[in-house]
């Protein structure tokens, strides 16, 4: 089973357009070979970012975000990282590495190539949605 840590920007992209992030997010709930991994910190970020007013300009964003958060709570496996890392310059993004280390994730899927400049972290591959969809799903 693949363990996936998904960066918040992938959720935003999935809710705005039908592209690789959308395909990934919508395939996980029905997949038996992929597990969405979350922590309280990651879920809090999802909730805060998806609730931003600036995204309300996109049709049905708020209602779709609410449905997505409900689905995440149903299907995702929750982990409780006990480690604190300072690997990424944007300190708030280290929570994704902490989660990946705790759950032994196979992948961090992110569109944030400015902060996630490495191709892996320990055993975890760090990939864009396009690379994940085309090469690893």
Image (tube, grey):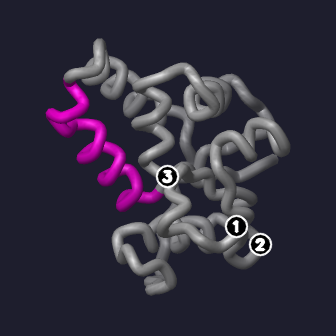
- Closer to the observer: label 2 or label 1? 2
Cβ–Cβ under 8 Å for marks 2 and 1: yes
Q: Position of residue 7 (x, y in %)?
A: 49, 52
**Magenta span includes 4:** no
| Res 7 label | 3
Q: Are marks 3 and 1 in contact (CB under 8 Å)?
A: no
Residue at label 1? 104
- Front residue of 43/16: it is 16
Q: Is residue 54 magenta?
A: yes
Total tally of numbered discs in the picture: 3
Give the camera-side residue of 94 and 44.
94
Mark with earlier residue (2, 3)? 3
Could you tell which of marks 2 and 1 lies nearer the N-terminus?
1
Report whether 122 appears left or right of 48. right
Question: Which one is closest to the eye, mark 3 or mark 1?
Answer: 3
The residue under the point 40% across, 36% down is 12
Mark 2 and mark 3: Cα distance apart in space: 17 Å
**Secondary structure of the residue carrying numbered label 2:** loop
Eyeballing the image, is 113 above or below 86? above
Whole-angstrom CA distance, mark 3 to mark 1, is 16 Å
Q: Main secondary structure of the magenta part?
A: helix
Q: What is the C-alpha distance between the residues marked 2 and 1? A: 7 Å
Q: Give the SS element for disc 3.
A: loop
| Highlighted magenta segment, given as a residue range | 39-56
Q: Secondary structure at mark 1?
A: loop
Q: Quadrant of the C terminus?
A: top right
Residue lying at the far left of the rendered structure: 53
Label disc, if present, on residue 123 of the rendered structure: 2
Looking at the picture, how far across and down is residue 81, in whole percent? 49, 72
């Amino acid at each position: 089973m693949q363990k996936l840590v998904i960066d918040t920007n992938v959720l935003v992209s999935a809710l705005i357009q039908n592209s690789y992030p959308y395909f990934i997010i919508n395939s996980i709930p029905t997949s038996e070979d992929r597990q969405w991994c979350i922590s309280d910190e990651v879920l809090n970020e999802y909730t805060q970012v998806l609730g931003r007013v600036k995204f309300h300009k996109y049709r049905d964003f708020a209602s779709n975000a609410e449905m997505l958060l409900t689905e995440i709570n149903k299907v995702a496996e929750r982990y409780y990282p006990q480690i604190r890392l300072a690997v990424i310059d944007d300190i708030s993004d280290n929570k994704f590495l902490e989660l990946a280390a705790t759950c032994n994730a196979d992948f961090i899927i992110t569109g944030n190539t400015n902060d996630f400049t490495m191709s892996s972290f320990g055993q975890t591959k760090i990939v864009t949605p396009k690379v994940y969809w085309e090469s690893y799903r």
